Image (cartoon, rainbow, N blue to C red):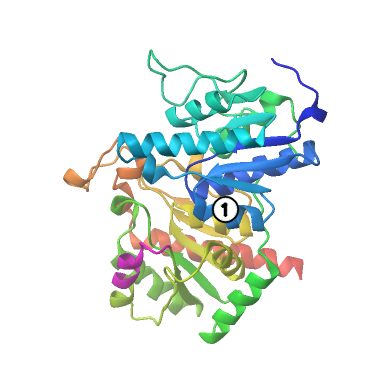
């Protein structure tokens, strides 16, 4: 293994060009690096709309924006985005690059930025083609510290670098003024903190979204049995599922889908009594904020992706799955498989009630 004195690590680049859930999990890597190398500047390469979330919460000192959309464009657009990205990164003169994206593009960027220390997976998640190569000179295991959860894929660089694992789970504290904003928003709808369930019904692919009519039935039963209010949350492109729930639910529901920036969403999730939703970025945000989680899974395995660090229940239909998605379903791709549609309402409601009872006992013991 390449050996370099920690005192030479003045700046560290983390390549993480995926989604908000991945960003949340990778925050634990950044925290461990900050503890091991105090004073080192941690910079993320990621989508521009994550920049404020990362810097405001102290996860990164700076973000260099990267557009996945442009990298899916024409050859000219891809070339221009790659050239702009590499030119910007080289100006920083990083001491170390950690590639946790593990894609063809991220490996190209790591090679062209060419820092003294380049940490990458060996073997890669997908077998490299004959014309590709891993530019890393410090090679890390696919999953570090003998664990199976995807969190430990993002913590694996620490093991490769010989860094002690001090922070094992993401924990992101909401900003005080965002908490004030969230509390004011709840008060506007006459909702008290810790007296509502945050529900996220969206996902990037329709097959990963539990059916809106089942969410509506579950919401009615949970509200009827517990007296808790329900707040729908989600991103700008997730209003269709929220609208369908509002149309089907008999219980009054507050819909904040698409209305909150990430920093405010984190603060709102912190105030929730419980989070109920599809396996998603907001699920990991809720866990990082310290809120109990009931997560709904399909082909994605909870062993790899369950919420960490909080009381939680992960529900998944029995496997192998009798396909209910027809031509829509791509059964080898968890992001395009419809297995979650096989979850019935009863076990979801039972899981919510069980977790509420379990965490109520914890709260009572703490008082």
Percent of width and height locating residue 282: 50, 57
Residue located at (58% from left, 60% from top): 292
Q: Which residues are magenta?
A: 235-244
Which sits in the foreground, 137 or 357? 137
Secondary structure at badge 1 equals helix
Q: Is residue 331 left or right of residue 37?
A: left
**Residue at screen point 67% across, 72% down:** 177
Residue 200 horizontal side relative to residue 266, left or right = left
On whether residue 236 falls in the magenta region, the answer is: yes
Quarter of the figure that contains the C terminus: bottom right
Residue 28, horizontal then vertical, whole percent: 65, 44
Residue at 44 percent across and 45 percent down: it is: 67
Give neighbour class at mark 1: few <14, some 14-19, many 20+ (Cα, 10 Å): some
Residue highlighted by disc 1: 51
Which is the main secondary structure of the residues drawn in magenta? helix
Where residue 268 sits: x, y (%)? 57, 69
């Amino acid at each position: 293994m390449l050996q370099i004195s920690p005192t030479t690590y003045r700046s560290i680049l983390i390549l993480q060009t995926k989604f908000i859930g991945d960003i949340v999990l990778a925050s634990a890597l950044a925290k461990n690096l900050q503890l091991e190398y105090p004073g080192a500047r941690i910079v993320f390469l990621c989508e521009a709309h994550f920049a404020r979330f990362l810097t405001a919460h102290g996860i990164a000192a700076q973000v260099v924006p990267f557009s996945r959309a442009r990298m899916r464009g024409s050859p000219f657009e891809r070339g221009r985005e790659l050239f702009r990205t590499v030119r910007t990164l080289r100006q920083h003169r990083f001491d170390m690059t950690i590639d946790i994206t593990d894609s063809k593009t991220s490996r190209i960027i790591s090679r062209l930025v060419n820092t003294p220390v380049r940490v990458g997976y060996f073997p890669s998640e997908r077998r490299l083609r004959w014309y590709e190569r891993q530019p890393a000179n410090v090679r890390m295991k696919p999953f570090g510290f003998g664990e199976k959860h995807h969190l430990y894929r993002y913590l694996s660089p620490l093991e490769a670098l010989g860094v002690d694992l001090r922070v094992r789970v993401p924990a992101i504290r909401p900003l005080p003024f965002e908490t004030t904003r969230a509390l004011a928003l709840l008060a506007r709808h006459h909702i008290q903190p810790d007296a509502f369930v945050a529900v996220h019904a969206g996902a990037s692919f329709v097959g990963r979204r539990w059916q809106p009519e089942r969410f509506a039935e579950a919401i009615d039963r949970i509200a009827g049995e517990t007296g808790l209010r329900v707040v729908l949350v989600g991103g700008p492109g997730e209003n269709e599922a929220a609208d369908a729930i509002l149309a089907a639910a008999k219980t009054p529901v507050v819909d904040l889908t698409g209305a909150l920036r990430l920093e405010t969403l984190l603060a709102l999730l912190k105030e929730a009594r419980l989070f109920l939703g599809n396996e998603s970025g907001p699920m990991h945000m809720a866990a990082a904020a310290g809120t109990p989680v009931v997560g709904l899974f399909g082909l994605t395995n909870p062993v790899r992706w369950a919420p960490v660090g909080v009381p939680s229940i992960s529900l998944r239909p029995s496997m192998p799955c009798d396909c209910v998605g027809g031509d829509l379903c791509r059964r080898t791709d968890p992001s395009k498989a419809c297995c979650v549609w096989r979850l019935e309402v009863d076990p979801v409601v039972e899981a919510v009630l069980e977790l509420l009872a379990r965490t109520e006992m914890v709260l009572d013991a703490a008082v």
